[in-house]
Image: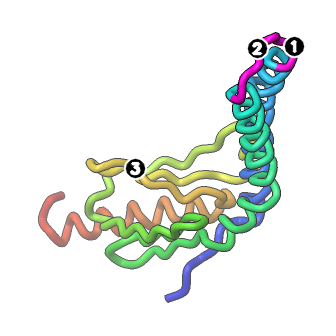
């Protein structure tokens, strides 16, 4: 079975999130760099600190253009009769298999950026943690949520737990 892709708007959402992160990084890096430049402290550490902060800013800025597209290409999910398979990552691609019988709670939500873009996040809570499928349109998120609930109740009935 082939992995289903996220909505293309997820790339835009990830970029906006990274732009916000860049703003926070620059709000810290720029004042520190200016203070270091104006200080009379002369040391190799001053140069190292300024270079390190510049590299962090450049890395964060590069992440806005490059990483969201790579992440989108890697992201995929499969909903099977007894499990959900999620594949994600950029450099280290993870494949997570979630048995439907272990799902305790399913939540469909939006943050402020995703609300503006009209995309949703589906979160599956298990005893061991939670897993997300982000970047879904409303119909897909609601459809997956209902499908998982139906499959879960069916599996519980088969086991005699309901």
Horizontal side of 20 relative to 34 (left or right) equals left
The one nearer the camera, 62 or 20, is: 62
* Magenta span dominant secondary structure: loop
The residue positioned farthest toward the top in the image shown: 40
Q: Is residue 53 above or below residue 9?
A: above
Residue 40 x/y as whole percent: 81, 10
* Residue identifier under label 2: 41
- Distance between mark 1 and mark 2 Cα atoms: 9 Å
Most extreme residue toward the bottom is 1
Q: Position of residue 35 (x, y in %)?
A: 81, 15
Where is 19 relative to 4, above or below? above
- Magenta region includes residue 73: no
Q: Closest to the observer: 93 or 145?
A: 93
Crowding at mark 1 (Cα within 10 Å: few <14, some 14-19, many 20+)? few
Disc marking residue 130: 3
| Residue for point 60% across, 69% down | 75
Q: Which residue is mark 1?
A: 38
The 10 Å Cα crowd at callout 2, few under 14, some 14 to 19, many 20 or more, is few
Q: Whole-percent x and y of residue 44?
A: 71, 29
Q: Residue at point 80% right, 30% down?
A: 26
Q: In front: mark 1 or mark 3?
A: 1
SS at circle 2: loop
Q: Pick out the residue farthest to the left.
A: 160
Q: What number of labels is visible? A: 3
Please give the name of the residue rendered at 71% of the width and 60% of the height, measured from the top-left corner: 67
- What span is colored magenta in the figure? 37-44
- The structure residue drawn at horizontal position 40% and vertical position 67%, both measured from the top left corner, is 96
Give 64 or 120, whichever is nearer the viewer.
64
Q: Nearer the viewer, mark 2 or mark 3?
A: 2
Lower sequence index among marks 2 and 3: 2
């Amino acid at each position: 079975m082939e992995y289903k892709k996220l909505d293309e708007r997820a790339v835009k959402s990830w970029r906006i999130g990274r732009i916000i992160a860049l703003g926070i990084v620059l709000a810290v890096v720029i004042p520190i760099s200016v203070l270091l430049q104006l200080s009379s402290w002369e040391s190799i550490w001053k140069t190292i600190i300024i270079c390190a902060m510049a590299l962090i800013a450049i890395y964060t800025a590069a992440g806005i253009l490059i990483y969201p597209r790579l992440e989108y290409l890697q992201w995929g999910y499969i909903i099977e009769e007894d499990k959900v398979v999620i594949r994600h990552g950029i450099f280290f691609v993870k494949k997570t298999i979630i048995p439907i019988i272990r799902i305790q709670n399913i939540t469909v939500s939006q943050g402020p950026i995703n609300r503006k873009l009209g995309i949703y996040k589906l979160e599956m809570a298990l005893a061991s943690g939670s897993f997300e499928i982000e970047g879904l349109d409303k119909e897909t998120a609601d459809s997956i949520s209902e499908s998982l609930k139906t499959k879960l109740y069916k599996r519980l009935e088969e086991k005699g737990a309901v």
